[in-house]
Image (cartoon, grey):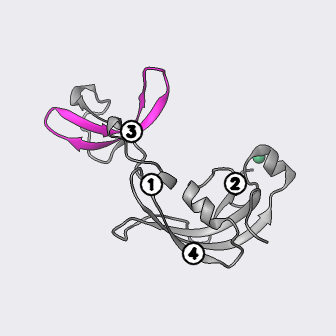
Amino acid sequence: MIISDDSVVSIDYILRSDSGEIIDSSAEGEPLVYLHGHEQIVPGLEAVLAGKQKGDALKVTVPPEHGYGDHDPDGVVRVPTSAMPMPEPEIGMELLIRSENGQEAPVRIVGVDAEHVTIDGNHPLAGKDLHFEVKVLDVRAATAEELAHGHVHGPGGHH
Ligand code: ZN
């Protein structure tokens, strides 16, 4: 069966940075299971998986515009340390901030000096090339119930 919209696809994947460092991967024996054509994985990876089938292996580099978008400099702000919720902010910490319209958004601390903290609201992978190594383990048609819910049921899915 060929991967197309509304296929339920199981993949093993490794995601590396430009330097070859592993950023993310599926766990041993626990493939990522997703519903194809429903924007559940990054668009650049979904596009190359279309037309593939069980047993196919591929390597693909997804540029930011087809991955997590460009890094937006406006998403980086310096705030006084006294405004932070924790007593000793450190680089790499993540927190939720509430914006003026009341929505909560995750941000990361990317800089700390004597009196200020720099926080970045961009996705950690924004602006980065994503080097994927993927193996297609299984492809099946989604059930009517899965399509109605918009997600996969069973192992690796909901319920
Ligand atoms: Zn469901």
Q: Which residue is mark 1?
A: 64
Q: Which of 74/95 is in front?
A: 74
**Does any portion of residue 67 appear in the rendered image?**
no
Q: Which residue is mark 2?
A: 37
Provide the residue span drawn in magenta: 95-121
The verdict on label 2 being within 8 Å of ligand 1 is no
N-terminal of the pair, mark 1 or mark 3, is 1
Q: Is residue 157 left or right of residue 89?
A: right
Q: Which residue is mark 3?
A: 121
User: Is 101 drawn above or below residue 96 in the view shown?
Assistant: above
State how far apart marks 4 and 1 are (Cα).
Answer: 19 Å
Can you tell which of label 3 and label 2 is closer to the viewer?
Answer: 2
Amino acid found under the numbered disc labelled 2: Gly
Callout 3: few (<14), some (14-19), or many (20+) C-alpha neighbours within 10 Å? many
N-terminal of the pair, mark 3 or mark 4, is 4
N-terminal of the pair, mark 2 or mark 4, is 2
